[in-house]
Amino acid sequence: MNNPEPYTLNDNCLYTREFYRLLQSRLQPDGIFCFSIKSSENYLNPALAEYTNLLVNSLQTVFHELYIIPGDDQIFLASRNLDIAERISGYPEILQASEIELQYFSGDYLAYRTSPERLEQFQTDRHKRDHREWNSDLNLKGYLYHFRLWGAISDPGLVTFFNLMQQYRWSIFLGLLLIFVIIHFVMVRRDRKLYLWNLLLVGGYSIGLEIVFLLEYQILFGTVYSTLAIIFGLFMLGLATGVLLTPESTTKLGKKKMERMIITGFIILCGILILPTLSPIYQAMSTLPVFLSEWIISMLFIFLNGFLTGAFFSVVTSAIYREFPSTSSGLTYGVDLAGSVVASFSISILLVPILEIRGLLLLLLIFMVIQRGWRK
């Protein structure tokens, strides 16, 4: 495999258990899967050792045989049943007997790369930073560990920050929840600020669900680029439809009931995104016809996300300008965008890598339930 390392969330999918299972299912019993990562000639620093162990753990959930050749490029060799070490030990003699003229490779070079002393030192350095985590399509650990490794070169302090966030991720989860509850408690007591607070949250929900949707779409269907125009077009169509249809519905149902219905809709959408993070459902989804899951379920989801966002914006805007006529023009639009901006940066840069997709969606789901149930 000659692909980039997981330096983006997109490339992460080529270094996961799910990807390795696909490879394993296509390999002959004595076939070998090979890839390499940038490394260090004779020393594994702690971040590099942890990154290496993440890949090792992920591979060993699928392949029985694993062999790593250390050096400036670590070469990973994995097989279902083949004894790779024994096969490699015989290559110098095979090359010599074949009488092939080689410029960049020789049996002596291979013997040097795989010498017992180098392999022993490599294993010693690696085991100093053992851990039990592995990389999967939906936990995106490869991206996080790769970022921590190479980010240390430009800014060691930033990596220390991410290490602390990773170490205390569930404390961060509870801390964010506590902050949300405190702010919501304060806002519930204030009329206009409560309107704006709820709109800020919905702006965040909308972009948050969209980010996770794009990640899951990429994971489930292989590429999102070919359908980006359709996805964003449907989202904008949903926004416009929600704005147009909501005023009449609000008149019939009432503002409070309409708000509860919209937040309930977001709860359902968030629950739908959680489903693929459950392994049995994730496996079952791969058996669905592509036209059903990709072109009906997915496209309906993104349309409804836009529709609910537009509907809530319409409800809050009409209510706040009716009850507070002196409110400056464009305030609600600015608040909605502010929620989207805060969510887009915090979710993509921090919360997805730290809490994983499931943890992020669980946090959003709790926020939504509190917002729907705890009202003035």
Image: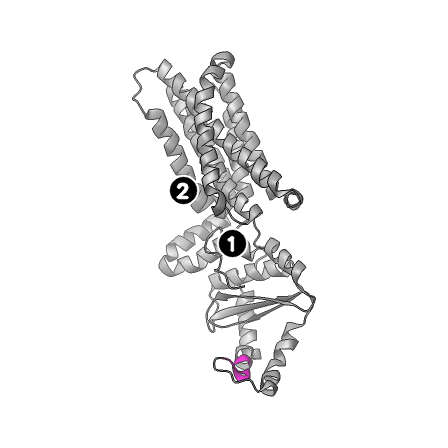
Q: Is residue 14 left or right of residue 30?
A: left
* Magenta highlight on residue 319: no
The residue drawn where x is 40% and y is 33% is: 339
Which amino acid is tagged 1? Asn
Q: Magenta span: helix, strand or loop, mainly?
A: helix
**Residue 106 covered by magenta stretch:** yes
Nearer to us in this view, 249 or 172 = 249
User: As rendered, which of 128 and 141 lies closer to the eye?
Assistant: 141
Amino acid at pointer 2? Phe
- Dividing the picture into quarters, in which one does residue 98 lie? bottom right
Q: Quadrant of residue 346?
A: top left
The residue to which callout 1 is attached is: 12
Q: Which mark is residue 237?
A: none
Residue 35 seen in this snapshot: yes
Question: Badge 1, how many Cα within 10 Å: few under 14, some, many 20+?
Answer: many
Residues at marks 2 and 1, CA–CA distance in whole angstroms: 19 Å
Residue found 53% across the figure and 38% down from its top:
361
Residue at x-position 42% and y-position 22%: 314
| Crowdedness near tag 2: few (<14), some (14–19) or many (≥20) residues, C-alpha within 10 Å | few
In the picture of the structure, the residue carrying the numbered disc 2 is 345
Residue at disc 1, secondary structure: helix
Residue bounds of the magenta highlight: 105-110
Residue 138 visible in image: no
Q: Residue furthest top?
A: 252
Which mark is first along the chain, 1 or 2?
Answer: 1
